Amino acid sequence: MRFFSDNAAAAHPKVIEAIIASNRLDTAYDGDEWSQALDGAFSELFETAVRAFWVTTGTAANCLALAALCPPYRAILCHRDAHIEVDEAGAPGFFTGGAKLVLLDGPGAKVTPAMAAAACDAIRDDVHQVQPAAISITNATEYGLVYRAAEVAELGEFAKSRGLALHMDGARFANALATTGDSPADATWRAGVDALSFGFVKNGGLNAEVLILFRPELADEVAVRRKRAGHLLSKGRMMGAQILAMLKDGLWLDNARAGNAAAQVLAKAAGDRLVYPVEANELFVRMTDPEADALRAQGFDFYEWGPGQLRFVTSWDSDQDAVEQLAAAIAAL
Amino acid sequence: MRFFSDNAAAAHPKVIEAIIASNRLDTAYDGDEWSQALDGAFSELFETAVRAFWVTTGTAANCLALAALCPPYRAILCHRDAHIEVDEAGAPGFFTGGAKLVLLDGPGAKVTPAMAAAACDAIRDDVHQVQPAAISITNATEYGLVYRAAEVAELGEFAKSRGLALHMDGARFANALATTGDSPADATWRAGVDALSFGFVKNGGLNAEVLILFRPELADEVAVRRKRAGHLLSKGRMMGAQILAMLKDGLWLDNARAGNAAAQVLAKAAGDRLVYPVEANELFVRMTDPEADALRAQGFDFYEWGPGQLRFVTSWDSDQDAVEQLAAAIAAL
Amino acid sequence: MRFFSDNAAAAHPKVIEAIIASNRLDTAYDGDEWSQALDGAFSELFETAVRAFWVTTGTAANCLALAALCPPYRAILCHRDAHIEVDEAGAPGFFTGGAKLVLLDGPGAKVTPAMAAAACDAIRDDVHQVQPAAISITNATEYGLVYRAAEVAELGEFAKSRGLALHMDGARFANALATTGDSPADATWRAGVDALSFGFVKNGGLNAEVLILFRPELADEVAVRRKRAGHLLSKGRMMGAQILAMLKDGLWLDNARAGNAAAQVLAKAAGDRLVYPVEANELFVRMTDPEADALRAQGFDFYEWGPGQLRFVTSWDSDQDAVEQLAAAIAAL
Amino acid sequence: MRFFSDNAAAAHPKVIEAIIASNRLDTAYDGDEWSQALDGAFSELFETAVRAFWVTTGTAANCLALAALCPPYRAILCHRDAHIEVDEAGAPGFFTGGAKLVLLDGPGAKVTPAMAAAACDAIRDDVHQVQPAAISITNATEYGLVYRAAEVAELGEFAKSRGLALHMDGARFANALATTGDSPADATWRAGVDALSFGFVKNGGLNAEVLILFRPELADEVAVRRKRAGHLLSKGRMMGAQILAMLKDGLWLDNARAGNAAAQVLAKAAGDRLVYPVEANELFVRMTDPEADALRAQGFDFYEWGPGQLRFVTSWDSDQDAVEQLAAAIAAL
């Protein structure tokens, strides 16, 4: 019973159906009808004109966005635990041509305007020190916390006041919105977000993420950078089709709700063991090594996440029985 | 009736079946059983120990290979019409960190040892001029010509004599082998090839190409560069599974034979109009504008490829009726 | 008697004096009075507000300019024989982050609007091909030809019409102006030049070149890139001081006239052997191997520049006796 | 009376003399007799065969070394206060092509094996996290502390045990050796250092630093990278000559001793106000704002270095009277 990662979840049947339906001799790259429909579909979802680019990984979405928002000789502020810092093999340095990540501390991988301001104020304004150009936040965070629209807006205002761009890594954007109930628009561009990595792969997609640009003037550059990074697939129709399937009738949001609900079942069982409140589909649970071993012995899989701390992740397809069993097992420890 | 590009062909039903069969909660990235089986499967196919990396595009396969074979401050020799020079948006410069492409001339996009030698000899051996590190050839070439194993071996010997690595862009490697009858081993490592971009997408795959390293010591670096470029997909099982499906019972070769056979039907009809002999699945045909218009009026789609020259591409799924009709239409001009 | 290269010439005594005069405990980097005076001095010389940055090499001046004018994913048009292509070890690729050089052909390393237009027209306007962003020309060219202001203006108009920036590598800018009599302003910004690498090292300077920006809005970026490339010297006063010495009373132009005059003495002797008209301080002379040997036997040093062709370069400090002797020796062949 | 920075010190008269003596028509780049003599001179000084490359800045020396020691996809461990992190405008990211700096904490900008080990141990050994390739230390540190040879050797052993290269930023290497009395060899390669940025500019040079490679097999790559970064000056003789002048009769060590001695005079006066022991030519002194103002009112210049803390730097040419006056003024506070 796997609670390793939502990365490992299956693709939703409707996604597979959509791919099959699009599997025919057609136009190459993103010239097909499905890919061409994305700008419109996301503009409707976000209630404003956006540009939408499919890519196959969150790393690609994040780093294409960062490359468009930060020149090689400037810096991006992010949390010390941000995925772009910790788990993308230095991809931001590669895509930007050597821009620097300035790391912020704080609980639960959340960034606040005060943290960002302190980091900016510590940088001398001269040619010897690398000046910041952007802030990147993750919503939900790497520790499963969410930013409410109002929190994002505070960061957006701060960013604007310092001339910084704002990027949101939304690998679990759906899970965050399922919790906050904010509209996609309120949680992003209305709050000052310039670019969003909108995650689908962890949430029922097969291999498509979408980079949303709320500043359409960046689209030409991003289109070229996507090709240049080898991310313009020949058969884009299978990308476009699966994303449209995820958007149809709010499947993306339904899936996220299912994942979050499973997490709440576990959260209830974990009680005081929780390191952070469970606001999305990840749980960080204090546990001794023997306790962890006991769970493993019962057939549960999960990651250790630092000493004495385990991570459990649910997803849209978390097996309800397995979830109940794990909840019972945790409660019984 | 589309003869634009094999990029636009459908995925083979067995590929789709394999993806469906692998769609389950599993291990993330390339830890799944299918991805883990690739090294073995390709080592068997190539009759030597190789390392195999799936990626989603030929651009990614080519440029990961080039980055591993050429440092930022050296050069790669390739034909002026090579895909890496013409159609990859400068990706070699991005992946290598600024290495230079030195362009060779010659008919049909084929490279010979003499051409490569002349280019090398024109480079002064000092720190002011960029020294070559690698040669990249395309098989079949961008004009549909093939390299026989013996021809590759001549290039391989030349490369070795100058301390250069040899890369083969095999976007249509299957089509080439279907024509030459050479074994995969003879056409590559036995002939001195260090790395091969083995194409599947144009030949029945959905979105998987494979980078084959004949120098396994490069594998650690390539693994990191793949991740760093955002090309390590979360659900690698759908990559691994489709490739295994293509390898099973020689599907890749059967598909290539089908595409080549369709091209031969057209070639016979085109006769003297052919710019190059048809050795794979591409035809370049001399035609006046009115003639081209006449074909279009009959519902055929294709690219103009320079003045007075059209390109037709067949694929594994070329409709036999459409091929016959086009052949007849060309013959009737 | 050395006619190898003006790179090897001595520094002018006034340059040395200026360095000595500035050698004192002072402000670091470019905070000193001499460096701070450069913007003003060059703004006066060019009759418009410019920003001036000292660097130690032409390669640095050229490539900082190109990095500011061309993003990593676009291309720079230049002549096949341009110094940036041939003799800078791939520095444009390094500084720009992988931008491409698109090479133009034509006699004497001169670029014309027609050549540039043909190159642009051959590039498909899509994401697969690298789109041009800038043109770089060298004045005087690598073969000692000059661009008159009107010729530059034609290129400037063309560049503007295509949305391209225009860079001038002026390693021998002084020699060019000494011949054309054009004003610095007419030969550059009034003709559409955006950035000029103004050479001093070949013309009496010790180790200072100057990058002139006619678009001051690029200055902040260039200042950072200069530091980031390790080109912001601690004791900038020795850079500023030597440049001011070169500007004082037109020393730069006097030196260039002296070098050009020496070249004319040789040109007269070479007569029909000249490959190109001598318009600056370089001569390319047809000569058989025995003839070249005969000159060497008389103590003259020079480079072979292709088969049957020698290059002689004069400078501000060319010894008049040596020049006369060489002229006589050539005439006597 | 300036105590800002040794960057601002004058060049030593013998350096100026050497430059004047080398100012003649000669061979370009580093083909001159002085530059050619450097490998030999430094091999003698270091008692082993080394390769020596002049460059004009410490940033260039550091980052050329790092680029040779760390591929783009790996990391360099250094102190949070290291010059390469804080004051080089992101140059390591530029020269390496995006490698990461992993920052270590600890007093006085000193790195210990324990700190480096902890940082390494925190990195998961997989393709998602950036693996370390090198350690860079500064000797004397940015806070004026020195590493004894035995301390370097401990780091060298640690580095070797983890397969890491070791770089030393020796902007004030002379000051360090003047204090420790260690031989150049003991303080570097015998202790496991692979590359040293040997500083001269702060210590009486005009504009020459030297990158010393204790692994000569890296020299070809470094030579190309130097050119490619625009750091191969045309008139290298003025670089070679000034360095030879600094080496002659131990001028570099005498200069460092003079600077250190001046610092000791101030250190005695500062007493308990010192934040760190004074082991080279820099003092960090606790002082209130009114006290700092009082010093400024007496004509002393210096930097604030964090709240309530001033930095004073002496050099080879620190005026003895000014030093005595400053010592008296501090003592009188």
Image (cartoon, coloured by chain):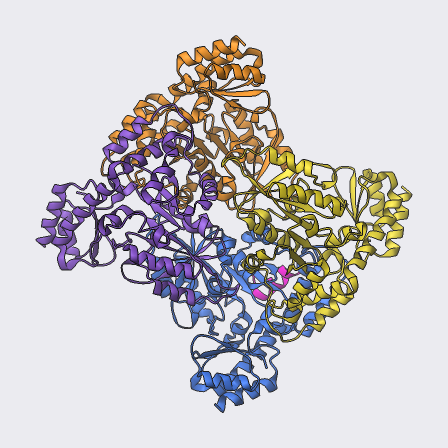
Chain colours: A yellow, B blue, C purple, D orange
Q: Position of residue A23 (x, y in %)?
A: 67, 73
Question: Against A291, is A236 above or below?
Answer: below
| Residue D11 in view, yes or no | yes
Question: Against B301, is A65 above or below?
Answer: above
Q: Where is residue D154 in the image (x, y as percent from the top left)?
A: 56, 27
- Report the magenta residues as a range: B37-48
Q: Residue at x 33, y 34 (%)?
A: D239
Residue B46 falls inside the magenta stretch: yes
Q: Where is residue C328 in the image (x, y as percent from the top left)?
A: 9, 49
Question: Against B29, is D188 above or below?
Answer: above
Q: In which quarter of the image is the N terminus of chain B?
A: bottom right
Q: Residue at x 54, y 63 (%)?
A: B197
- Does the magenta stretch mainly form a helix, a strand or a loop? helix
Say left or right for A36 vs A11.
left
Q: Nearer the viewer, residue D185 or C16?
A: C16
Residue furthest out toward the front: C47
Say left or right for A147 vs C160.
right
| Residue B72 in view, yes or no | no
Q: Nearer the viewer, residue A140 or B269?
A: A140
Residue furthest out toward the bottom: B332
